[in-house]
Image (cartoon, rainbow, N blue to C red):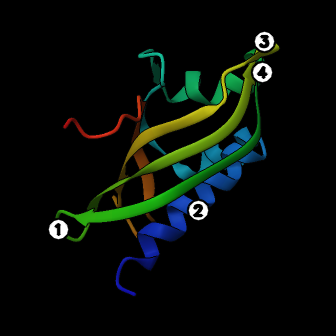
């Protein structure tokens, strides 16, 4: 499948999130990474990597129904569903969320350039 390279990145990112592995995430995030969380907060790369040290714990984390949209040879946007079992400082923040992940390839390897996690709602009407 032509999109397997991008989907491999998404699977690796989700596995690192599930394992609460900031060292693995460090290798997958682009230098200018930006992440938008489900509550609307915006984190830079270092802040995203520090989440596990600041009280975030993922027990399960998966990207479901990923759809890859390519924009040239070095950029792709993946839209899917983030299904996670997560707590922050002991409070359950689990759920299913809409995920948009921007994958970039500045050199030979794909990296996560941006992530946006937001509300998952049914289509109106």
SS label for mark 2: helix
Vertical comparison of 76 with 89: above or below: below
SS label for mark 1: loop
Q: Earlier in the sequence, mark 1 or mark 4?
A: 4
Residue positioned 77% across, 17% down in the render: 55
Q: Which residue is mark 3?
A: 89
Q: CA distance from mark 3 to mark 2?
A: 26 Å
Q: Which residue is mark 2?
A: 11
Q: Which percent across, then down, holds residue 93?
A: 66, 22
**Residues at badges 4 and 3 in contact (C-beta under 8 Å)?**
no
- Mark 3: few/some/many CA within 10 Å (<14, 14-19, 20+): few
Q: CA distance from mark 1 to mark 3?
A: 41 Å
Q: Earlier in the sequence, mark 1 or mark 3?
A: 1
Q: Earlier in the sequence, mark 4 or mark 3?
A: 4
Vertical comparison of 31 with 43: above or below: below
Q: Earlier in the sequence, mark 2 or mark 4?
A: 2
Residue positioned 45% across, 75% down in the render: 5
- Which is more foreground, mark 1 or mark 3? 3
Q: Which percent across, then down, holds residue 37?
A: 48, 25
Q: Which residue is mark 4?
A: 53
Q: How many marks?
A: 4
Q: Which percent across, then down, holds residue 98?
A: 41, 40
66 displayed left or right of 51: left
Q: Which residue is mark 1?
A: 72
Q: CA distance from mark 4 to mark 3?
A: 10 Å
Q: Nearer the viewer, residue 106 or 104?
A: 104
- Mark 4: few/some/many CA within 10 Å (<14, 14-19, 20+): few
Q: Nearer the viewer, residue 80 or 4?
A: 80
């Amino acid at each position: 499948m032509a999109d397997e390279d991008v989907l491999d990145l998404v699977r690796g990112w989700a596995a690192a999130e599930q394992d609460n592995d900031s060292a693995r995430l460090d290798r997958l995030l682009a230098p200018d990474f930006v992440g938008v969380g489900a509550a609307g907060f915006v984190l830079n790369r270092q802040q995203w990597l520090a989440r596990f040290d600041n009280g975030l714990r993922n027990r399960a984390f998966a990207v479901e129904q990923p759809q890859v949209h390519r924009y040239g040879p070095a950029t792709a946007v993946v839209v899917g569903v983030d299904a996670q079992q997560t707590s922050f400082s002991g409070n359950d923040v689990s759920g299913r969320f809409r995920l948009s992940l921007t994958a970039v390839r500045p050199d030979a390897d794909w990296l996560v350039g941006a992530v946006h996690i937001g509300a998952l709602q049914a289509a109106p009407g």
